[in-house]
Image (cartoon, rainbow, N blue to C red):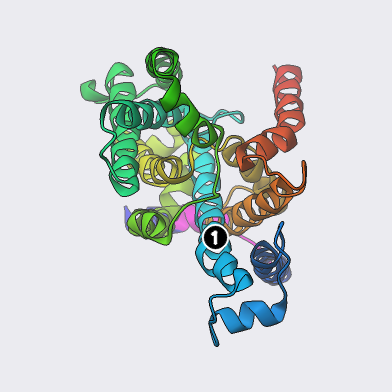
């Protein structure tokens, strides 16, 4: 089996030295852009800050306004955008590979709606919960939604069909969305508290909340790299993958669990930030193809850049006020979504 996986992977990754080198160089350039975007997130905003302020914040902290803003607001915000952008993008790539649907995203498994319902439920019925408790509650809701989708799609019977998965995801999402709206309609105070989160935002998140989910994200990133050969084979087509000896049902379960870890943790922290998991996987495939050895790092780097730049833009669209970053990604992603939908329609 291992020998077969190796031979198929060599066919998929039969790249010349020059093309491999170019992909590596471009990845390094994107990494430099990522660092620039991260620094921009630390320095740009309503309160003016400089390089000197940034260096003194971590070398000669004086509790000035600039130092407090950078340390307690912008650094957690930038790190949150970096980790969540990478995770959402990678989870989107997994979903599109799993469903063979170019318009698939983590929301297809009910991750967003499940997390949103449990978040709203916690705010309304457990006001004594801390932010960490609510985040974990929301993460549990995302996981529960995926379990329901998996069960309804026939996963317990030993096989998962893509069409059944899509229908089950739509049904579970509608279920959780309807109950979320009921709670918000009954509890105006809860609606005011969670409205910003429901739109998707990286603002106001503490380092503690982010550190709680980083182990889940990091574990999922590592597992994706370990499974990259098998993901390459699966992307060739399920029937071909089965013919090559791959246990596709088990791999599907692994992919679903990875989406839970990546998207569930992201939504629990920042809310349902849409279209990152749709746009970036398409851009990655355009740049480096579908080979996961390259697609994984490209998705992570480009996803982080995209969300960092979107967050910077959210600070200036209606300056001096801010809008949730989820609204900015929706504005950017809506035309792209229409383009992908029209392209898929023309192919059919």
Between 247 and 310, the one nearer to me in the picture: 310
9 shown above or below 286: below
Residue name at image x 55 percent, y 57 percent = 77
Residue 84 x/y as whole percent: 51, 51
Residue 102, visible in the rendered structure:
yes
Q: Which residues are magenta?
A: 7-16
Q: Main secondary structure of the magenta part?
A: helix
Asked where in the image residue 330 lies, by quadrant, the reply is top right
Q: Is residue 236 visible?
A: no
- Left or right: where does residue 295 sit relative to residue 211? right
Query: Percent x, y for residue 172?
Result: 38, 17
Q: Which residue is mark 1?
A: 73
Left or right position of 258 against 51: left
Q: Tell me which residue sits at (33%, 26%) in the image.
A: 124
Name the spot of residue 95 as percent of width and height, x first. Answer: 49, 36
The quadrant of the picture occupied by the C terminus is top right
| Side (left or right) of 55 relative to 334 | left
Residue 140 on image: x %, y %: 28, 37
* Residue 214 versus residue 152 in the image, above or below: below
Query: Compared with residue 231, is residue 345 higher up or lower down, i.e. above or below?
Result: above
Is residue 113 covered in magenta?
Answer: no
């Amino acid at each position: 089996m291992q020998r077969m996986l190796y031979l198929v992977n060599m066919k998929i990754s039969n790249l010349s030295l020059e093309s491999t080198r170019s992909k590596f160089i471009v990845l390094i350039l994107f990494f430099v852009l990522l660092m620039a975007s991260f620094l921009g997130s630390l320095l740009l905003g309503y309160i003016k800050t400089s390089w000197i302020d940034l260096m003194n914040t971590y070398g000669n902290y004086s509790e000035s306004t600039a130092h407090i803003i950078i340390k307690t607001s912008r650094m957690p915000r930038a790190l949150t955008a970096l980790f969540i952008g990478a995770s959402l993008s990678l989870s989107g790539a997994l979903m599109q590979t799993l469903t063979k649907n170019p318009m698939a995203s983590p929301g297809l498994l009910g991750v967003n709606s499940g997390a949103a319902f449990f978040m709203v439920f916690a705010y309304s019925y457990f006001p004594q919960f801390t932010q960490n408790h609510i985040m974990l509650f929301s993460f549990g809701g995302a996981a529960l939604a995926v379990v329901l989708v998996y069960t309804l799609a026939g996963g317990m019977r030993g096989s998962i069909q893509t069409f059944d998965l899509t229908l089950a995801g739509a049904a579970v999402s509608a279920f959780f969305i309807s109950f979320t709206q009921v709670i918000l309609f009954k509890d105006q105070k809860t609606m005011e508290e969670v409205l910003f989160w429901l739109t998707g935002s990286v603002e106001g998140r503490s380092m503690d909340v982010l550190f709680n989910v980083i182990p889940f994200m990091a574990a999922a990133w590592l597992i994706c790299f370990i499974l990259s050969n098998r993901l390459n084979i699966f992307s060739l087509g399920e029937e071909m993958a089965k013919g090559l000896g791959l246990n596709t049902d088990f791999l599907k379960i692994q992919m679903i669990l990875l989406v839970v870890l990546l998207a569930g943790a992201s939504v629990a922290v920042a809310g349902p930030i849409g279209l990152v998991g749709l746009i970036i996987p398409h851009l990655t495939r355009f740049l480096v193809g579908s080979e996961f050895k390259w697609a994984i790092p490209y998705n992570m780097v480009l996803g982080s850049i995209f969300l960092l730049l979107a967050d910077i833009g959210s600070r200036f669209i209606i300056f001096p006020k801010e809008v949730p970053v989820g609204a900015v990604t929706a504005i950017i992603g809506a035309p792209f979504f229409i383009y992908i939908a029209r392209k898929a329609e023309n192919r059919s």
